[in-house]
């Protein structure tokens, strides 16, 4: 479900000798949290008002072949191989669209920006992205919008005005509740556990960790981060 590039929560009992571990909840962002109620049942996501940017000087693409590029955090891993496959299948189903996946071989924001900038120069019609850094990626995405290119994010967002839409695989507080509830069920309310993430600047993981901290404090105060 949540694969290599997503936050991997490894629940394990640890001895009290781990006194040199990092401070609890290192890696969470500093944005406001919205923890779900402890007994909340799964529900549908609530529609939100549009908060994105707007492409300028868009060409008339009606009836024409469309070229898009998918730029994930990095290429060559299972999760993004799967998203690439889905994007390719959707493009084939639409019928007049060619989709290419390209990106850095490591989750490096500078390399990701370079890839996106190159495709702006090539004149693609659309860019899909998964941000390695929400702030650093914003200028090149705004450049794409200014060039009349449609820009849509998924999995890890940018600053809202740097893209049109963002497609999230799940609500952050929902992921937090599911992971912490299952952790407490598996290892007990008095256990210690560790969180293994990718980088501390990746927006998705930062949100999950922050929401996990808020939900744990409210509903499972026993388990501690080692």
Image: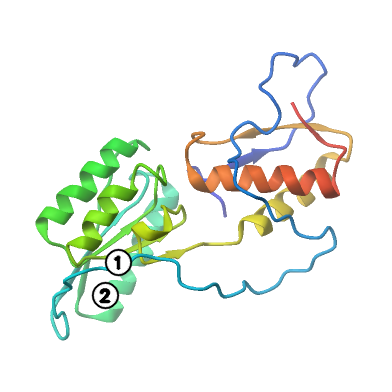
In terms of secondary structure, where does tag 2 sit?
A: helix
In the displayed structure, 106 sits above or below 38; it is above
> On the image, numbered disc 2 is attached to which residue?
92
**Contact check, label 2 and label 1, Cβ < 8 Å:** yes
Percent of width and height locating residue 5: 48, 43
Mark 1 crowdedness (10 Å alpha carbons): few <14, some 14-19, many ≥20: some
How has the structure been colored for display?
Answer: rainbow
Residue drawn at the location 47% of the way across and 37% of the way down: 201
In the displayed structure, 65 sits above or below 128; it is below
Percent of width and height locating residue 16: 83, 18
Percent of width and height locating residue 125: 19, 67
46 or 188: nearer the viewer: 46
Mark 2 crowdedness (10 Å alpha carbons): few <14, some 14-19, many ≥20: few
Quadrant that contains the C terminus: top right
Along the horizontal axis of the image, is 92 left or right of 185?
Answer: left
Residue drawn at the location 70% of the way across and 72% of the way down: 43
Tell me the tag on residue 212: none
> On the image, numbered disc 1 is attached to which residue?
88
154 or 88: nearer the viewer: 154
The alpha-carbon separation of the residues under discs 2 and 1 comes to 6 Å
Percent of width and height locating residue 112: 29, 43
In terms of secondary structure, where does tag 1 sit?
A: helix
Residue drawn at the location 53% of the way across and 62% of the way down: 169
Along the horizontal axis of the image, is 142 left or right of 86?
Answer: left
Quadrant that contains the N terminus: bottom right
């Amino acid at each position: 479900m949540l694969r290599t590039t997503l936050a991997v929560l490894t629940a394990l009992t640890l001895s009290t000798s781990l006194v040199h571990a990092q401070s609890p909840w290192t890696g969470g962002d500093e944005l406001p949290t919205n923890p779900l109620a402890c007994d909340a049942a799964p529900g549908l996501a609530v529609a939100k008002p549009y908060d994105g940017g707007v492409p300028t000087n868009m060409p008339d693409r009606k009836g024409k072949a469309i070229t898009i590029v998918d730029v994930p955090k990095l290429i060559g891993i299972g999760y993004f191989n799967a998203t690439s496959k889905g994007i390719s299948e959707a493009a084939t189903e639409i019928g007049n669209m060619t989709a290419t996946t390209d990106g850095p071989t490591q989750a490096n924001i500078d390399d990701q920006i370079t890839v996106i900038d190159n495709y702006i120069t090539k004149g693609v019609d659309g860019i899909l992205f998964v941000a390695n850094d929400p702030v650093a990626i914003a200028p090149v995405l705004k450049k794409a919008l200014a060039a009349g290119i449609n820009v849509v994010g998924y999995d890890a967002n940018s600053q809202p005005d740097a893209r049109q839409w963002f497609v999230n695989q799940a609500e952050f507080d929902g992921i937090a509740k599911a992971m912490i509830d299952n952790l407490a069920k598996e290892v007990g309310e008095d256990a210690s556990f560790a969180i293994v993430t990718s980088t501390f600047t990746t927006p998705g993981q930062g949100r999950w960790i922050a929401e996990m901290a808020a939900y744990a404090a409210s509903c499972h105060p026993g388990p501690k981060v080692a």
